Image (cartoon, rainbow, N blue to C red):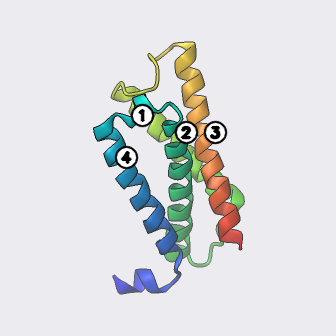
Amino acid sequence: MIYLFTMNKTYIHALVSTSALAILHFFASDGHWYVRYPGFDILMHILGGLALAFSIFWIIKTFLPKYEPNFWSLIVLTLALGFAWEAMETMYDIAGAPVGTTKYYWDSAKDLVNDMLGAIIAAFLLKK
């Protein structure tokens, strides 16, 4: 188990961003922040994209050490997981608007764009 954390230190970025996301979501759900503060969902999707990209990078570097994750691999995998998240929102009827409406499609598209923004930020931070 220790081996997984000695190969590269990217797990720190993944752990911190994922923990921040989980803690914020916990308080936001309890305090109805998603409804009270309309922009809060945007922040959470950007942070979610950041956490996903950091986690994807760490997983690839740890379990596929010969493969060097690039910008596009982080973007495509984050987008795929973002689509999965939107599907889960639809399945549990927790999407930002009723399924099938124009507002629903705009909200889902906005969420995916914000996921990508977070992944782009992570990719640039990882490049440094």
Tag 3 residue = 113
Q: CA distance from mark 3 to mark 1?
A: 18 Å
> Which of labels 2 and 3 is toward the front?
2
Tag 1 residue = 34
Q: Is residue 73 above or below residue 31?
A: below
The amino acid on which the numbered mark 4 sits, given as a three-letter code, is His
Q: CA distance from mark 4 to mark 3?
A: 19 Å
Q: Of label 2 and label 1, which has the lower sequence position?
A: 1
Q: Of label 3 and label 1, which has the lower sequence position?
A: 1
Q: Is residue 122 above or below residue 4?
A: above
Q: Is residue 2 left or right of residue 74?
A: left
* Classed neighbour count for the residue bearing mark 3: other residues with Cα under 10 Å, few (<14), some (14–19), many (≥20): some
Q: Percent from the top left, x then y, of residue 4? A: 42, 80
- The quarter of the image holding the N terminus is bottom left
Q: Of label 2 and label 3, which has the lower sequence position?
A: 2
Q: Is residue 39 left or right of residue 74?
A: left
Tag 4 residue = 25
Kindly indicate the quadrant of the structure image that contains residue 72.
bottom right
Which one is nearer the viewer's eye here, 26 or 106? 26
Q: Of label 1 and label 4, which has the lower sequence position?
A: 4
Tag 2 residue = 42
> Which of labels 3 and 1 is toward the front?
1
Q: Residue at x 39, y 61 (%)?
A: 19
Q: Percent from the top left, x then y, of residue 8? A: 53, 81
